[in-house]
């Protein structure tokens, strides 16, 4: 009996990109091999301290983090990194990288952004080994951390700045809701209500971040409770997550 060997998928050209909506879903999917599912970003420590204990307190915690942290730091940094990728400006990309690393308030959060950014670059290198943005990343003294790394991947898939921030924001939101389901714990219906409520907040956070893109002197990453709880997590007795 004759058998037919499966064909090896043809490697796409570096300038061939999926439809923007599909690219957004791809980048915000938990299947993206960057390990976002393994981090709670202080949520697990907040549960241990009793700050988060049910659906309502989970919503307050995540909404505060979205509005006070992401909208003022991670998202503007990613927006500026995206502009640097479009302009092929390694100097600005390095400035974003330096700011992000200088503002990580715990060792776990610093390790998280470095690991996820490095994994994003590895993913892009395997997916599009000849892409010009890999050369831009190679001009940095170290692999990009998460916000500039995500911007590199999004730009390589042809996303504009708004879609890039929407995908980054929803990726964070989805991972955090999944963390809440596991460590609060919450049921699936509660998780869907959290996604619905916080998805409605995301467009305003993206708009704010785009407004701050070219004003890095106004970026802020001052979240004292998150910093304290994140530091406590490093010595927490029982842990599911890496942060």
Image (tube, grey):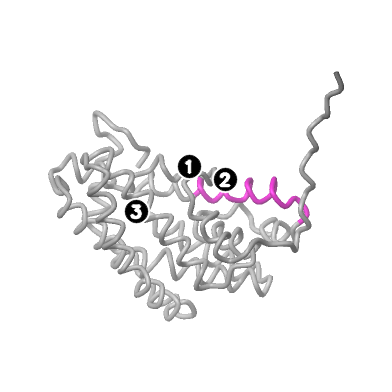
Looking at the picture, tell me which residue is in the foreground, 13 or 86.
13
User: How far from the left and from the top, in percent, is residue 79?
Assistant: 50, 71
Q: Which residues are magenta?
A: 114-130
- 121 within the magenta span: yes
- Nearer to us: label 3 or label 2: 2
Upstream in sequence: badge 3 or badge 2: 3
> On the picture, is 174 further left or further right than 159?
left
Residue furthest to the top: 1
Say which residue label 2 marks: 119
134 vs 164: above or below: above
- Marking on residue 105: 3
Main secondary structure along the magenta-highlighted residues: helix
SS of the residue at dot 3? loop
Upstream in sequence: badge 1 or badge 2: 1
SS of the residue at dot 2? helix
Image quarter (top left, top right, bottom left or bottom right) of the N terminus: top right
Q: Are marks 1 and 2 in contact (CB under 8 Å)?
A: yes
User: How far from the left and from the top, in percent, is residue 90?
Assistant: 65, 67
Say which residue label 1 marks: 35
Residue furthest to the front: 1
Spatial distance from mark 1 to mark 2, Cα to Cα? 8 Å
Image quarter (top left, top right, bottom left or bottom right) of the C terminus: top left
């Amino acid at each position: 009996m004759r058998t037919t060997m499966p064909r090896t998928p043809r490697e796409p050209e570096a300038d061939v990109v999926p439809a923007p909506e599909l690219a957004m879903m791809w980048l915000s999917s938990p299947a993206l091999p960057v390990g976002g599912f393994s981090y709670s970003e202080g949520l697990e420590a907040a549960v241990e301290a009793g700050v988060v204990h049910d659906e309502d307190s989970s919503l307050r915690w995540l909404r505060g983090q979205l509005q006070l942290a992401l909208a003022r730091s991670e998202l503007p940094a990613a927006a500026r990194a995206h502009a640097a990728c479009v302009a092929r400006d390694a100097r600005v990309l390095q400035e974003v990288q330096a700011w992000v690393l200088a503002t990580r308030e715990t060792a776990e959060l610093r390790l998280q952004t470095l690991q996820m950014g490095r994994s994003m670059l590895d993913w892009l290198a395997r997916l599009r080994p000849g892409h010009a943005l890999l050369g831009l990343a190679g001009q940095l003294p170290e692999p990009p951390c998460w916000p500039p790394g995500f911007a590199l991947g999004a730009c390589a898939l042809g996303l504009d700045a708004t879609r890039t921030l929407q995908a980054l924001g929803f990726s964070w939101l989805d991972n955090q809701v999944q963390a809440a389901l596991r460590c609060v714990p919450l049921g699936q219906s509660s998780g869907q209500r959290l996604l619905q409520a916080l998805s409605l907040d995301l467009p305003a956070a993206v708009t704010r971040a785009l407004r701050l893109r070219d004003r890095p002197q106004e970026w802020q990453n001052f979240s004292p409770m998150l910093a304290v709880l994140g530091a406590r997590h490093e010595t927490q007795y029982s842990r599911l997550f890496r942060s």
